[in-house]
Image (cartoon, grey):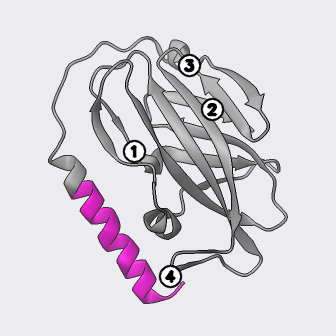
Amino acid sequence: MNKKLVGAAIVLLLVLTVAGAGCTTTTTTTSPSPLAQTTQTAQTTQTGQASGSSKDLILTVSSQGEATTIGTLSKADNGSKYVLYNAVLKNIDVTNLTVNPYWFNLRLSNGSSVGLELFAWAEVTGRFPLTNGTQPGDTVNGTIVFQIPQTATPAAITYYDLTYNVTANL
């Protein structure tokens, strides 16, 4: 990856962080035990769509296909491809939850994981937005993008913000 792209990624990340920081509110909430937060169920609902749930969140993902180029700046590394998913995250029981696309990870069938591909995600129309202050019943959705080896097989997508955790097995 060239220095201009790395610099652009850093600037974009800083802009998104600063923009999100100005929109937050401080709220005291009582969280259930960590064990309750990580108890999950997962199911495949139809071809290309999977869902998982915990006490606090429901995650549904559906494949939007693969690409080697997205927009004008994002070209997958040699031997790699982008995989795109529509993610729908429903807040079940959390007051003032900030939902952030950077908290998605894709686990591959070999056990390795990859995070959101920043440049490709930034160029996607309908990308999953940073959303502050969601309330129980609110839903956030949009496209998330990961870069994986051409031969890799996606196994699961996890949303984990260091407090709340939900996985949809693909």
Q: Return the x and y of residue 68 as percentages of the image width and height.
A: 68, 74
Side of 30 where 35 appears, left or right: right
Q: Return the x and y of residue 113 as percentages of the image width and height.
A: 67, 51
Q: Secondary structure at mark 2?
A: strand
Q: Amino acid at mark 2?
A: Thr
Q: Are marks 1 and 2 in contact (CB under 8 Å)?
A: no
Residue under pointer 3: 54
**First in sequence: mark 1 or mark 3?**
3
Q: Are marks 4 and 2 in contact (CB under 8 Å)?
A: no
- Neighbor class of circle 1 (other Cα within 10 Å; few <14, some 14-19, many 20+) is some
- Neighbor class of circle 2 (other Cα within 10 Å; few <14, some 14-19, many 20+) is many
Residue 60 in which image quadrant: top right
> Distance between the Cα atoms at labels 4 and 2?
31 Å
Residue under pointer 1: 100
In the image, the segment drawn in magenta is 1-18
**First in sequence: mark 4 or mark 2?**
4
Q: Secondary structure at mark 4?
A: loop
Magenta-drawn stretch, dominant element (helix, strand or loop): helix
Q: Are marks 1 and 4 in contact (CB under 8 Å)?
A: no
Residue under pointer 4: 72
Q: Quadrant of the C terminus?
A: top right
Give the mark toward the camera: 1 or 4: 4
Q: Amino acid at mark 3?
A: Ser
**First in sequence: mark 4 or mark 3?**
3
> Distance between the Cα atoms at labels 4 and 3?
38 Å
Q: Secondary structure at mark 1?
A: loop
